[in-house]
Amino acid sequence: MCGIVGLFLKDKSLEPRLGQLLTEMLVTMTDRGPDSAGIAIYRGGDAALSKLTVQSDQADADFATLAADLGAEIGADVSMRRADSHAVLSLPADKAQDARAALATLRPGLRIMSDGANVEIYKSVGLPKDVAARFDLAAMSGTHGIGHTRMATESAVTTQGAHPFSTGSDQCLVHNGSLSNHNNWRRKLKREGVRIESQNDTEVGAAYLTWKMQKGASLGEALEGTLQDLDGFFTFVVGTKDGFGVVRDPIACKPAVMAETDQYVAFGSEYRALVNLPGIEAARVWEPEPATVYFWSH
Amino acid sequence: MQTLDLATTSLREMNATLQAQKDQTNATQWSIENPRGAHAIAVGLDAPIEVTVRGSTGYYCAGMNKQATVHVTGSAGPGVAENMMSGTVIIEGDASQYAGATGRGGLLVIKGNAASRCGISMKGIDIVVQGNIGHMSAFMGQAGNLVVCGDAGDALGDSLYEARLFVRGSVKSLGADCIEKEMRPEHLEILRALLERAGIDAKPEEFRRYGSARKLYNFDIDNAAAY
């Protein structure tokens, strides 16, 4: 069991409240996933810049001179904003690949959570309310975001095993369920050169989407592909630079509720997660159909 | 009218209060305020009381109901009226998966749509859905009636024993051993009575009846391919 929440804002006036609304939704889903929690938030896009969200278990030591060290290594201005064990590095978009390579040498203990113009991913073990407080998620503004509370089944309770998983630039995936053919797909995708770092089933789902899109599929086509290629139970919610999508496996035993108003589209594993949203009483509320891809974008 | 507000009363206290009502209670009308999607609202009732839940509920609302009438003004989460014994449960909105599962008696009315596995393993309950139902509904149904005014999803009535299924709209596919059957006068009467009890205005003649072909009742080596 896990909990998923998602909020895609249509009304710009709600953007300063995105973090606060998502945090309330996330904490409500604690019963479904008390092991770890995470959030992907999309905000502040500058097409010329790329944001790398990095995480370290030795944050004080790793982050102390990180911006200056990385800037010198790749020959560009790098700025850094720290939030507990995570930091967001902003650098010229054309230097993002160089930065990834440089970080592997400069700070081998660092994990890259995400990269892209808009996305930032924060995740950690612990209760959702503690994770939210650690990163001050409630204070974050943004255009859309996805959160996840995890009750672990397929791999250990670690930051690495927490969701969301990055699936490529400005893309992320969260999952409720369990995949049963992830070991086969991990071997196959590794042979294809896709980077997979954990034993987690969802990371394989994320890697699968990345691989499909590298081969030319659109996100919608990649999500359709999961219905054919991934065996097991899943409700997936994916985030992209300007939208978010939902797909459930054909059995659809993992719950999902959606709500839409003029102001937002919201996703929750349960209706409880949505009850504090503004205007929910008048929202169109429905259960997404099995084996059907839903997508919203700005 | 007695009111229990879940903003100020705990779920356990609310259920204990309703469960304590006896057959002879004078407090027959109850209102549950602020359900806000909470789980297990109004479960295990056993008295002829009328409970109105004002809003939407989470998992397992009105489970194991006996005698009581539970009316939800919003939508219901998974497992509404699971294992109902008698009484009536009415959902004004939609119901999530496995509504009325394993129910042995009583009437469940869903005014909106029901998701997958509606009436799974039903054992005598009557279920009337004004909208559509999802896949694998009435799976292994053993007794009772499932009435669908809209469409049914894939694998309707898979491995059905004896429940009667009435569908007005389309059926995406029938499950193993489920077949369309002749609508005889006695079935029209059963259907008319169910629609009337559910307060739904529909003509029985517009429905088709589905039931078990009874080929999976006992293991038969010739049927091995059907399992």
Image (cartoon, grey):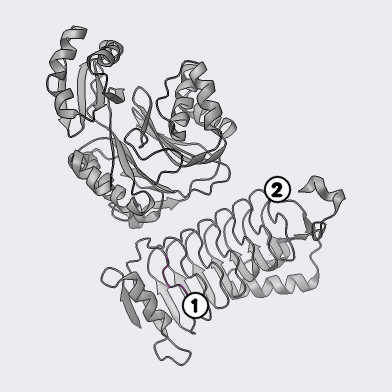
Number of numbered labels in the structure image: 2
For the residue marked with disc 2, what is the amino acid? Ser
Residue B63 lies within the magenta run: no
Give the overall secondary structure of the magenta segment: loop
Above or below, A155 relative to A286: above
- Of A166 and A24, nearer the camera is A166
Residue located farthest toward the top when viewing the structure as drawn = A75
Name the residue nearer the viewer: A106 or B206. A106
Residue ID for mark 1: B69
Estimate the x, y position of residue A166 in percent, counting from the top left: 36, 28
Picture quadrant of residue A142: top left
Q: Position of residue B163 (x, y in %)?
A: 71, 66
* Residue B157, x across and y down, in percent: 70, 56
Q: Which residues are magenta?
A: B40-45
Quadrant where the image shows the N terminus of chain B: bottom left
Q: Please say if A271 is above or below A150.
A: below
Q: Identify the residue shown where x is 12% and y is 19%.
A: A65
Helix, strand or loop status at disc 1: strand
Q: Magenta span has B43?
A: yes
Q: Chain of mark 1?
A: B
Disc 2 and disc 1: Cα gap in Å? Answer: 33 Å
The crowd level at tag 1 (other Cα within 10 Å; few <14, some 14-19, many 20+) is many
- In this rendering, the answer to whether A212 lies above or below B178 is above
Quarter assignment of residue A238? top left
Residue type at mark 1?
Thr
Residue A197 percent coordinates (x, y): 40, 25
Q: Which residue is mark 2?
A: B173
Label 2 CA crowd tier, 10 Å (few <14, some 14–19, many 20+) = some
Which residue shows up at 50% across the image and 31% down it?
Answer: A223
Q: Are marks 2 and 1 in contact (CB under 8 Å)?
A: no
**Is A223 situated left or right of A156 in this image?**
right
Query: Measured along the vertical axis of the image, is residue A192 above or below residue A133?
Result: above
